[in-house]
Amino acid sequence: MISTTPHPATGSIKLANKPTPTGPDELKKAILSLLASGRGDEALALCNSILKHEPDNLAAKQGAEWVLTQLVPLWHVPMMNEYERNKAFHDGMAALITPDKVVFEIGAGSGLLAMMAAKLGAKKVVTCEAVSLIAETARQIVERNGLHSQVTVLAKPSSEVRIGVDLPAKADILVHEVFSSELLGEHVLPSIEDAKARLLKPGGAVLPAAAGVMIALVGGDTLGKNLYVDESFGFDLRAFNAINPRKRPIYREDLAPTLMSDAVEAFQFDFQNDSSFPAAQKTIDITSTQAGLCYGVIQWIRVDMVEGVRFENHPGQPRAVSNWQHTIYSFMEPVQLVAGDVLAINATHDRTRPWFELAQAAALRQ
Amino acid sequence: MISTTPHPATGSIKLANKPTPTGPDELKKAILSLLASGRGDEALALCNSILKHEPDNLAAKQGAEWVLTQLVPLWHVPMMNEYERNKAFHDGMAALITPDKVVFEIGAGSGLLAMMAAKLGAKKVVTCEAVSLIAETARQIVERNGLHSQVTVLAKPSSEVRIGVDLPAKADILVHEVFSSELLGEHVLPSIEDAKARLLKPGGAVLPAAAGVMIALVGGDTLGKNLYVDESFGFDLRAFNAINPRKRPIYREDLAPTLMSDAVEAFQFDFQNDSSFPAAQKTIDITSTQAGLCYGVIQWIRVDMVEGVRFENHPGQPRAVSNWQHTIYSFMEPVQLVAGDVLAINATHDRTRPWFELAQAAALRQ
């Protein structure tokens, strides 16, 4: 519920007129002020200007690094190198793009998908990127690959893109990839509602056409040791579980989660056919397919590009390079199951985050 | 360089006198205010009081979860379940503790190490924990294990512990485990300087007695795909590397990093014998032991409890449960090496973070 995204400050900060901060504390303050007012590029420039004269200034070096981690999250590079993801977008676009089509994309990143669309023969591709440092880099990459006459990179969020100003007319195809590991964290739902209403021709294609938040009951001893504490060296540590956060991203692909139920599509979003995506709440009965200790629910995503072209980061298929993680929603206590047990899971999303938990007073209803 | 630790606000927030926030935005504001003024416990209580009357209030549920992730980082549970770490502390304490010894510990966590010290026969164990929610939980755990007469948990940072108030007299043994993955991130150096000067008898034992920041040159194709982008689908994406952060924690243990040099102890801290630990800067020549593409430096930690009892999370030994990660410091560009090549690495620490990079103008000096 709490965003760490920089937001515009109400007052203006006239840092440019001040002398360059010299001490580490002063520099830190200046960086935080600039980031808080959405001026990360200036914070980076400030650090780099210090490093130009003092190449060993550790505070400036770490400051620049910190600004970069805020502006350019670490998932970008694995994402660009994730073949299955790229291939699914490529094949989906190949099925839709013809030489008369104008493509509008939400979320340029490196410009990779926009360049793919251009190479696939689109008449014109306009893509937008909210982080200006990334947008500027995407422009360089598009230029380096000789596609600057076909691909335009706008340094703004899609909500600020205007027909007649940024985009000559409504587009034929809307491409989007602003999915977080939980699907909804990068505000994909409001972005698509807005873009479909303002920037896409009536009946235009949306790619991906649909996506789902997938869950299954999960167990596994090794995974469990990362989620729950029982005893250690003869001491009963279970009271700690009450203050342990329920939700945990699993960056590791080697923990061998045991899927204890079939996969369930908890929430499905039909981007092609629907125009609004309200918050939702439901209870889902999930039947255990095997005996064992169930620690909670494991969540992943499924993305349908076009009919027949699907990407899914199913936890049963470990990936060497992946920008999307699986997320565990732990129960308060692990539940011992036998095959055929049914657990009632409360599933909720508020348009930006899903949430899963064992339904209150949910007994094992064998 | 920028800490996300809550710090005390200068003005007081009289939220307790205000009506309970009802809307999600109002609740979010209240939570942020309380956290920013170091009152996370109250933020949690606020969410829980709403959930008592509205058990389905998603904003309150996610708010409580978010506060917990701020107060109780996700590494706690894997740490408690990491046998090798616990065993090393246990064996180190077993070598030092006799029935006449008073133990003071920095960083209680669940109370596990303090309870170990008590079971090993210490006369008295006093431990402190800066996060009051965790301190309260540690007290419950100590009580549940019947050790409350031997173990006292103070809800304060070690810098606020006073002789004659919190601790009857200076301790015989100082136990500490406030190591981050990069060793220094949880302010272990100033904490030990302070505790040795004020809270430990002259000549008292410090456990761990020493620790080191370890590095080696690193390569490996799978690891590389997570660090660096070259081309994808025929497009040259290399310009993106210039804005990609250099430092990356590697949560995964399955990326098979190739160590391309012997291990080097970049920084060593002798907690037992030294009383101050200043910032440091040096250049380290590292000789490649094999041919291949070197992406940068991989960093891990080595902890010497007492003579002969060592913990080390060497990247060559993947761990199923680990609270400490390896960290990669990528070079701007990968460097092609043959065995015998020497790379000059600039190594720096400012007492809270190390930093490693290829020395400027460092040519391959074969």
Image: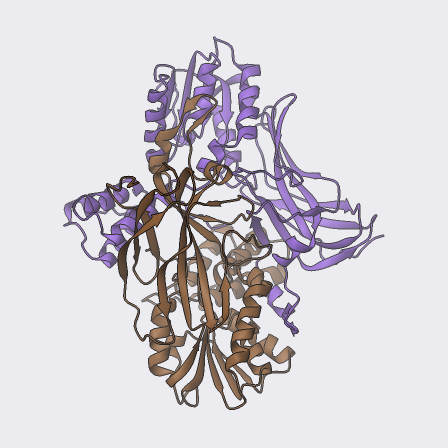
Chain colours: A brown, B purple
Q: Is residue A338 above or below residue B124?
A: below
Q: Left or right: where does residue A278 sit relative to residue B204?
A: left
Q: Nearer the viewer, residue A53 or A269?
A: A269
Q: Nearer the viewer, residue B107 or A150?
A: A150
x then y, percent, for residue A224? 46, 38
Tell me, yes or no, if residue A177 can be seen here: no
x then y, percent, for residue A5? 40, 61
Tell me, yes or no, if residue B73 can be seen here: yes
x then y, percent, for residue B191? 48, 32
Q: Nearer the viewer, residue A240 or B115?
A: A240
Q: Quadrant of residue A363?
A: top left
x then y, percent, for residue A44? 52, 63
Q: Is residue A196 above or below residue B356?
A: below
Q: Residue at x 51, y 52 (%)?
A: A23
Q: Is residue B156 above or below residue B99?
A: below
Q: Residue furthest right?
A: B366
Q: Nearer the viewer, residue A14 or B85?
A: B85
Q: Number of numbered discs present?
A: 0
Q: Quadrant of residue B305?
A: top right
Q: Is residue A251 above or below residue B138?
A: below
Q: Left or right: where does residue A340 sit relative to residue A61?
A: left
Q: Residue at x 49, y 63 (%)?
A: A71
Q: Quadrant of residue B153?
A: top left
